[in-house]
Amino acid sequence: MFAEGKFWHDQRTFVVNHLKDMGFGRTNIESQMLAEVQDFLGEIHRRAKSNPCGVVEFSSLFNVSVVNILWAMVAGERFKRTDARFLSLLSNIQSLFRVSNQLRAATPVPLYLMRFLPFLKQYIGLRDELFVPMQQFVMVRARATH
């Protein structure tokens, strides 16, 4: 019983510390999220005005905002909705979700196992032509911010 309580406490401490490092609980991340919401609402308004019926397709709008907020938490920056590299990344993410088995892809598999057992990528549904560009995007952006 004590080991389970200590394990839970250690895990909670780890998560809370890392969330704080990423800005959770600080006004910085809150202001980034509010800026994203304002951008989101502005984009809805722009699209509604440009359509004679005022109809707006929301699916692509949400994707941009969600990825932007997550990226802001991880890297401390956001992308413009018109950034070509960012739009390419979003396209790859959408394709990956369309062609992969999400239940299998949600199962955590250590990277060394995928390197040691290459068939795991195919089993999970990760295709190099989609996955590698996303990895490269993250690596390039990570190098640029550090």
Image (tube, rainbow, N blue to C red):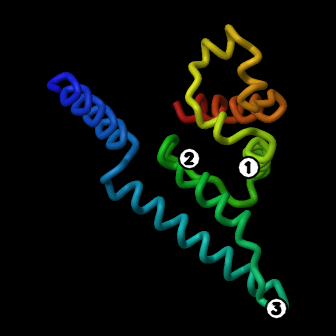
Q: Which is more toward the observer, 130 or 86?
A: 130
Mark nearer the N terminus (3 vs 1): 3
Q: Earlier in the sequence, mark 2 or mark 1?
A: 2
Q: Residue furthest left?
A: 2
Label pair 2/3, CB-CB below 8 angstroms: no
Q: Tell me which corner region of the image, top left, top right, bottom left or bottom right, holds residue 144.
A: top right
> Picture coordinates of residue 95 (x, y %)?
80, 45
Residue that lies at the very extreme toward the front in this rendered image: 1
Residue at point 42%, 62% (across, down): 31
Q: Of all residues shown, which one is farthest toward the top?
A: 116
User: How far is the residue under mark 2 from the one under mark 1?
Assistant: 12 Å
**SS assignment at label 2:** helix
Residue that appears at 15% across and 25% down: 2
| Quarter of the picture holding the N terminus | top left
Q: Secondary structure under badge 3?
A: loop
**Front in this rendered view, residue 130 or 76:** 130
The answer for how far apart the CA atoms under marks 2 and 3 are is 33 Å
**Residue 140 or 130: which is nearer the viewer?**
130
Q: Residue at x 68, y 74 (%)?
A: 43
Point out the tag, 2 or 3, that comes first from the N-terminus.
Answer: 3
Q: Secondary structure at mark 1?
A: helix
Q: Which mark is residue 71?
A: 2
Picture coordinates of residue 98, whole percent (x, y): 79, 47
Mark 1 residue type: Leu
Apparent side of residue 46 relative to residue 112 in the rendered image (left or right): right
Residue 86: percent from left, percent from top:
72, 48
Dot 2 amino acid type: Trp
The quarter holding residue 47 reads bottom right
User: Amino acid under label 3?
Assistant: Cys
Q: Which residue is mark 3?
A: 53
